[in-house]
Image: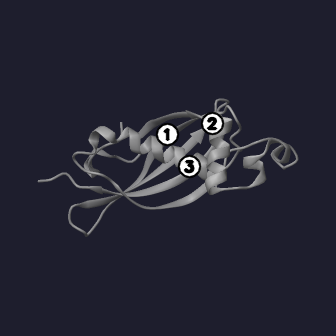
Amino acid sequence: MIGLWYEDHEIGQSAALGAHTFARDEIVAFARKFDPQPFHLDEAAAAESIFGGLVASGWHTVSVSMRLLVDGRREQREAVAAKGRGVRDLRWTAPVRVGDTIAFSLRVESMRELQRPGWGLIGMRVVGVNQDGREVCAYTLFALAARRPG
């Protein structure tokens, strides 16, 4: 479970965010709307590409990780929400193919109390790994987290 308050986190803490299986129609629909490159849209064109087949957009993959992160915090929303401050070191290290199941996890890498009263900054490394244990994406997410009242 991801902590609710800044004080609920500690460096080294990790959490599974969940997994998602990428279906052909979902890959194509996302690409049509947001990343219309041939290797995301068309099997024949994708077969001739460097990927040798249809692959999900990296932006699609990262968007799924964010959805899982937000869904994991749903029951905590009534108290406080973390606010994104940016991403660093985003890498797509392997293609995500039709039928791949990607498991996402995070690890707290840094914490910093802010001078702004009531807030701290948490750096979390998010990693996606396919069903074969191969990393497909990774990035560091920075989020403001509310300090525990009192």
Q: Earlier in the sequence, mark 1 or mark 2?
A: 2
Q: Which residue is mark 3?
A: 62
For this view, does 58 lie left or right of residue 69? Answer: right
The reply to whether dot 1 and dot 3 touch (C-beta < 8 Å) is no
Residue lying farthest right?
A: 48
Q: Nearer the viewer, mark 1 or mark 3?
A: 3
Q: Dot 3, crowdedness within 10 Å: few (<14), some or many (≥20)?
A: many
Q: Mark 1 is on which residue type? A: Ser
Q: Which residue is mark 1?
A: 105
The residue located at (19%, 51%) in the rendering is 148
Instruction: Give the structural element (helix, strand or loop) at label 2.
Output: loop
Residue lying farthest bottom?
A: 115
* Relative image position of residue 37 (x, y in whole percent): 74, 55
Marks 1 and 2, how far apart at CA: 17 Å
Instruction: Give the structural element (helix, strand or loop) at label 3.
Output: helix
Residue 138 marker? none
Q: Earlier in the sequence, mark 2 or mark 3?
A: 2
The reply to whether residue 79 is visible in this rendering is: yes
The residue located at (33%, 54%) in the rendering is 82
Marks 2 and 3, how far apart at CA: 12 Å
Q: Mark 3 is on which residue type? A: Val
Marks 1 and 3, how far apart at CA: 12 Å
Q: Which residue is mark 2?
A: 22
From the viewer's side, name the closer residue of 88 and 77. 77
Quadrant into which the N terminus falls: top left
